[in-house]
Image: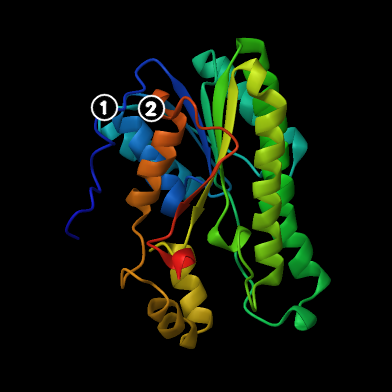
Amino acid sequence: MKGISKQQPEAGIAFSGKVVLVTGAASGIGRAIALGFGRAGASVVVADTSIEGGHATAAMIVESGGKALFVQSNVTRAHEVEALVEKTINYYGRLDYAVNNAAVDEERQPLAEADDEQFDRIMGVNVKGVWLCMKYQLRQMLKQGGGSIVNMASVSGLVGSPSRAIYGASKHAVVGFTKSAAAEYAREGIRVNALCPAAVNTPMLARAIERDPAFEKKLKAAQPLGRYAEAAEIAHAALWLCSDQASYVNGHELVVDGGLTAV
């Protein structure tokens, strides 16, 4: 697609000698972010529950000349997240950046019709998962004297989301966690920001459309640019937020939505 780089990191951004942890990196946005960091010289820890997808992402980074380690991890389980950070340190010796991208989106119905199981699953991954990841990442970054964290939120974390109230609430929580952590740890040399994309061309979006075909027409009609974002476009934003180019950006929700929230 014209104007979209799917292969190269942002010009001038390099992470040689740095270590990044990316959750939910077996596919979609997480994979694009992991690949972007790998191309920019970082050593990448690929985390996901999917063994096949996680190994595939790590292999793609290595095949491109980068360094990568896959760790199977469920972000809703404290002992697995703690072990994930420990494995990162044991393997690479440090943790400079973290992108907390793991999330689920299985909701497409009125709030009054949702059930407890659905609520618990969405909140468990999208909210508790981000909290647990930040908890253990921050502990390590405090030992090192600095770092940068990017939490994957959504435009649904900024505006109302009819038929997606639980998902929207979970992403509002991610924005809230981000702002609070940014204010709390800024003087420790740790920056925390959030990314808020609109619809992105990923397997998750494809599954949502498959569950509700009518949703696609409504979604496309709402896009000012007339298309979905590509995962690489979100990855470029994540790399920038972690880089020194964004050294004074902290506690910010960076909207990457093609103008969706402007109308």
Task: Identify the residue at image location x=47%, y=62%.
Answer: 198
Q: Is residue 242 above or below residue 187?
A: below
Q: Residue furthest right?
A: 116
Amino acid carrying label 2: it is Gln
Where residue 78 appears, as percent x and y from the top left, is 76, 37
Mark 1: secondary structure: loop
Label 2 close to label 1 by CB (< 8 Å): yes
Task: Identify the residue at image location x=58%, y=49%.
Answer: 102
Task: Identify the residue at image location x=61%, y=11%.
Answer: 145
Q: Is residue 165 above or below residue 98?
A: below
Report the mark closest to the observer, 2 or 1.
2
State the residue in front, 35 or 191: 191
How dense is the environment of label 2, judged by Cα within 10 Å: few (below 14), some, or many (20 and up)? few
- Residue 105: image quadrant is bottom right
Q: Residue furthest left?
A: 2
Regarding residue 181, the answer to whether it shows in the image is: yes
Where residue 129 appears, as percent x and y from the top left, is 69, 45
Task: Identify the residue at image location x=52%, y=84%.
Answer: 212
Regarding residue 82, the answer to whether it shows in the image is: no
Q: Which mark is residue 245?
A: 2
**25 horizontally vs 120: left or right:** left
- Residue 150: image quadrant is top right
Quadrant containing the C terminus is bottom left
- Residue 262: image quadrant is bottom left
Amino acid carrying label 1: it is Gly
How dense is the environment of label 1, judged by Cα within 10 Å: few (below 14), some, or many (20 and up)? few
Q: Which residue is mark 1?
A: 12
Q: Residue furthest front?
A: 263
Where residue 116 appears, as percent x and y from the top left, is 83, 70
